[in-house]
Image: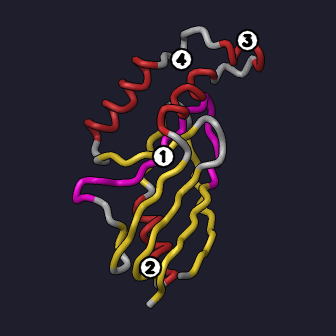
Amino acid sequence: MELETQTLTFDTKGFNDIIDITARLQRLLNDGNYDEGRMLVFVPGATAGLTTIEYEGGLIQDMKDFFDRISPMESHYHHNDRWHDGNGYAHVRAAMLKPDLTIPFVHQRLCLGTWQQVVLIDFDNRPRKRELVVQICGKKH
């Protein structure tokens, strides 16, 4: 088994920006000639998270609406009292997703369902440059 660490960078818009990162992750497997193993994806920072969804317009809007309902921007957050940055809601939302995913792969393909894509969600209240850490542990051809 070999271990390799790489980074991927994404420019985000914040405010529930949902980005399909599946193709970029798959490209790392292809470029590295990995056959089987697992991939760990991690987003540093406390206002973004990772998950899997069916990446289609209706569900993307449903996800945004869901986060707006359960953690509204305009609610009071004690975090904002301390830091005055207005992104307390973003921290709460990100904590519900978590910052990492582990995805197995076989025959150089991520083991995702037909309608399953890996997404980065940036909840912050401003655009960001997000750098993901990707560790691949696996066998090469």
Three-letter code for the amino acid on which mark 3 is drawn: Asp
Residue most toward the left?
Answer: 114
Residue 38 position in % (x across, y down) = 46, 68
* Picture quadrant where residue 104 is located: bottom left
Disc 1 residue type (three-letter): Leu
Q: Mark 1 points at which residue?
A: 50
Residue that mark 3 sits on: 81
Task: State yes or no: discs 2 and 3 in contact (Cβ < 8 Å).
Answer: no
Q: What segment is highlighted magenta in the picture? A: 113-131
- Give the residue pinned by disc 4: 73
How far is the residue under mark 3 from the one under mark 1?
27 Å
Determine whether 76 is above or below 12 in the image. above
Q: Nearer the viewer, mark 1 or mark 4?
A: 1
Residue type at mark 2 is Asn
| Residue with the mark numbered 2 | 30
Q: How far apart are marks 1 and 2 (CA)?
A: 22 Å
Instruction: Looking at the image, tell me whether mark 2 or mark 3 is earlier in sequence order.
Output: 2
Q: What element carries label 2?
A: helix
Instruction: From the top left corner, tell me how far across and down residue 21 is, in percent.
Output: 45, 56
Q: How far apart are marks 3 and 4 (CA)?
A: 14 Å
Q: Which of marks 1 and 4 is nearer the N terminus?
A: 1
Tag 1 secondary structure: strand
State the CA–CA distance, disc 2 to disc 3: 47 Å
Pick the front one: 62 or 34: 34
Q: Residue at x 50, y 73 (%)?
A: 28
Q: Which of marks 3 and 4 is in front?
A: 3
Q: Does the magenta stretch include residue 122?
A: yes
Residue 86 point in image, percent of width and height: 66, 19
Are the two marked residues, 1 and 4, in contact with CB atoms closer than 8 angstroms? no
Q: In which quarter of the image is residue 105?
A: bottom left
For the residue marked with disc 4, what is the amino acid? Met
